[in-house]
Amino acid sequence: MSLILSGKSSVCPELFIRIILIFIIFDAGTIPLFAQSDRVLPLSDGWYLQSSAQLDKDGKALSGTGVETKEWYPVTVPTTVLAALVKNNVYPDPYYADNLKSIPGYREGRWLAMKKDSPFYPSWWYRREFNVPASWHNEIIILHLDGINYKANIWLNGEQIADTTEVIGMFRRFNFDVSSRLARDKKNVLAVEIFAPGRIADIAYRTKQVEATTGWDDHNPQPPDLNMGLWEDVYLQAGGPVFIEHPYVVTDLDLPALDRAWLTISAELLNRTDQAVEGQLTGKIGGVSFQKKIGLAGGERKTIRFSPAGFKQLIFNNPRLWWPHPVGPQNLYDLDLTFRVNEIESSRKKVRFGIREVSTYINEDGWRGYQINGKNILIRGGAWMTSDMLLRLTDRRYDALVRYAREANLNALRSEGFSIRETDEFYNKCDEYGILVIQQIFGRSIPDEDLAVELIRDMILRIRNHPSLVHFLGHDETFPTDYLDKKYRALIAEYTPERTYQPHSGAFHIEDRFKTGGTRTGTLELWTYATPSHYYTHKEDGAWGFAQSGGIGGIIAPFSSIKKMLPEQARWPLTNDIFSFHTVLQGIEYFDLAITSLEHRYGKPNSIEEFCLKGQVMNYESARGMFEAYGRNKYEALGITTWKYDAAWPAAMTWQYVDWYLNVGGAYYGAKKACEPLHVQYAYDDRAVYVINNFYQSFTDLKVSARIFNIDMQEKFSKTVTIDIGEDEVTKALVVEWPKELSKTYFLYLMLQNSQGKNISENFYWLSTIPDLQGSKEEVITEKGWGILKAEPVSYADFTQLQDLPKVQIQKSYQIYREGKELKAFVRLKNPGKNLAFMIKLSVKKKTGPEEVLPVYWQDNYFSLLPGAEKTVEAAFLTGEDEPWSYQIAVDGWNVE
C-alpha cells in the first residue's frame, strides 16, 4: 500500500491523514512519513567513469543492472573527467613541468573549440548503483545534480529522465522528482552522459566566451577537457508532499543608530502532488518563532512572506551585527523553517544569515563607493579566481585562501567573471571570516542569452542569503547586450533588490567610468610591473577612485614553490619554455619590464634562488606601496580589488598573492603590512609620514616616531610626535627633515605606539637617492597576438647596495603548542649584532624533512630587524594529529646566516 500523495493517487487528504496515524500506531519501529524529511543521501562515492568511445551500450542498458565496470575508472563525485583520469594515473600530474601539454586534446593559447580528435570530444558516462534507505519507503524523493558541465542525458533504472535540451549550462542546479522511478527494495542505477563544452565550430572567435561555462582567459592554460563532468554534488533528498525552496532573509537596519533591525522572511512552497494540501509553515531564529497556516492546490508553487509589519517578533532590538573584518565581529544567525501537515514534518530548511546593511553609491567624481551599516569603508582586496584549474574544490583550499585574506586585513574579494559562479563553501568562508564579495555575472555576452539568464537566476537564488555578498558586476571589461543588461537588472530587482549592480567591471579610460558603473580596470603597465611610488603619482591608474583589477604584476613565487612545479633544468635561466609555461599565456616576455626592473633596482641575479629572493623584496615594496596609497588617499580613493588574489594552478611568475600551493611571499606580506587597521606609513609623493585609522573609533595620544639610517646603519635623523586621530581618518603625523648626506640606499624606520608605550604598528622602508622616473613606453603586439608593454624608464631606484649587507646571525627561541585543532608557534628573535638583518623570512618545517608546512598564518613575515632589536612573532597552522614536537621553525633572509 502506498502512502504517498502521488500524481496518480485518488486518496483524499482526510483518509491520507488517517492512514498515516494508523501507520504510526501499528508500526512503531518504522520512521513515519515526513518524520525526518529533507534528509539527504549524498551520492559521492562509488561512481565509475568511462568514455562513450569505449562502450557499445546506450543509456537504457548502462542504467540497468548487470553492466560490467571492470574497465571503467572508479571515481568520487564531484570530479571533472580530467581530474578523475589524473587520479587514476591515466595521465601524469598536469601541474608539474609541461606534463599538461602531453595530455591528448591540449591546445596552446586561449581556445574555445575542442578538436574532434580530442578524447574529451565524445561523451563520457558517470555510473553509480545505490540503495534507497528503508526509512524513505513512502517519501517523495528528489534527485539533485548541482553542477554539470556542460550538457547531459540522465538515465535512471533504464528510463531517461532528462536530456541535453533540459540539462545544459555549467552554473545551474538541476532536480528531478524520481519517486515513481526508484526501486525501494533493490539496487538502483543512475547513469549520466556528459557532453563537454567546446563542441562548437573551430573558428577564430572574436570573443573570450561563447558558452555558459567557465573559462580561464589568460590566467593559466585551458585544461584539455574544458572542465567537463559532474563538478558539483549529486544527492537524493527525501520529504513529504510540500517542499520548502529558496528561503530568504532580508535585514533592514535603523541607521545610524544600529539599535533596531527589521527582518523580512520569505520562502517558496512547492506542492509536489496533484492533491490540495494544508499545513503550517513555522520559522525560528533562536528564541523567536513565527508561523502561518497555508493551503496549496495540487502542483502549486507559492511564495510566503513574514514581514515585521505583521510579525512584530521580527523586529530585533539591539541586534548582533555582521561586519567585515577587521572593523567588527561576524555575528551570524540561523533561521529554521519547517512545513508541517497535521503536525507531521513535510519539509525543513535551515539558513544562516547576518544582520547588516550594505550599500554602494556614486560620488560626485563618478566613482563607486561602499558603505557597511551606514559607515563608509575603503575596499582593499583582490580578484578571486577559481581555486583549482581541475575544479578540485576542497574545504581545505577554500578555508586557507579566504583565511589568508582575513589574516592580511583584506576586506573584499571580486569573484571574477570567467571563473565558476562560486560555491556555497566559498561564500560560507567569506561569511565566517568577514570578507565582502563582489560577484561578477559573466565574462562575456554569450549567444544563448536566455540560458545565461537562467544561470544567473539560479545563482542569485543560491547565494543571496550570504551577508558577505554586496554587489554585482555585469561582464568583465565589456558591456552585456541590452537584453542581458535588462534581464540582470530585473533578476536583481526581483530576488535581491537590496544589492546594487553595474553593467561593466571597469573602464579602460577613466572618463568612461560614468557609463561602466563607477569603476576602472587595470592597465597593461600595472599588470606588468609598477613601482611603489606609481600609485601616489599617477592619477589615471593610481590610488584614486575605484579599480576593479588594477594592481601589481610580475609576482614571483617563493623558491619553495618553484621547486615543486619545475624540474631543476627548467628553473634557470628563466628564458625556457617550461618556466614560461608557468607564467601567463602571454609567456614570460610579458614580464620583461618586471625582470628588467628587478635587475636594475636590486642587481642582476645569478641563480633561481637569488631571483626568487630579490623578487620577494621587489614584490613586497610594490604591494605595500599600492595598498598604502589607497589608504592615504581615502576617500578620494574608494577601493581596489587588485589583479589578482590567487592562482588556479602552479605559477612561477604571474598575478597572485597566494599561490596554488597555499604559499605566500613578499607581495602578500607587503599587502598585510599596508592593511593594518591602525597603521603608520610613508608616502612616496610628499615624503611625509601618515597614520591611517580604519577603525570606527578614535584614538588619542598616539606616539609616532621616524628614524633614518644610512646603509651602514648610521642614524641620520630622528623625530617623535604625539597625535590624535578620529574614526576612519587619515592624519599627516610629521614631515621628515631629509638629511643631505645619505647613502645611495638608505632606510626609514617608523613606529606607532599607544599612550602606554605599546607598539601598534611598525614599518621599515628601503629608499634610494635615485628616483624611479618613467620614460618612454608603448604597447607591442607579439607574434602570438598578445599585447605587452615595452618601456624605457629614465631612471630606476638603486638598491644594489643591499647586496653588500654583512651577514647576520639571528638568535631565536620558540615554542610550539596545540590550541584546539591548530598548532600555534610563538617565536622570539633577536639581532645581536651591529648590522641590519634585512627581510627575515620565517617558516614552519617538519623535523623529518625540508618541506615547508602550508598554509601557515604568520602574524608578520618578510620583516627587518635593526641592530640590537628584538621581535616576537606568532603563527597558526593545521597539522592533523601531529604533535608540536614534530615541527621546527626555520629562519632565513636576505643576509641571514
Image: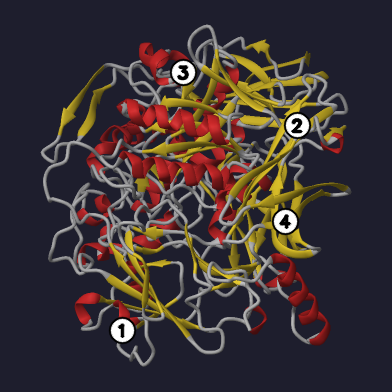
Q: Can residue 657 be seen in this view?
A: no
| Residue 689 versus residue 240 in the image, above or below | above
N-terminal of the pair, mark 1 or mark 4, is 1
Q: What element carries label 1?
A: helix
Residue 787 lies in what quarter of the image?
top left
Distance from label 1 to label 4 (Cα)?
42 Å
User: Disc 1 vs disc 3: Cβ atoms closer than 8 Å?
Assistant: no
Q: Is mark 2 on a helix, strand or loop?
A: strand
The residue wearing badge 3 is 518
Distance from label 1 to label 3 (Cα)?
56 Å
Q: Where is residue 79 in the image (x, y as percent from the top left)?
A: 42, 67
Distance from label 1 to label 2 (Cα)?
69 Å
The residue wearing badge 1 is 61
Q: What residue type is labelled 2?
A: Ile
The residue wearing badge 4 is 278
- At horizontal 79% and vertical 32% (from top left) the residue drawn is 308
In the rendered image, the quadrant that contains the N terminus is bottom right
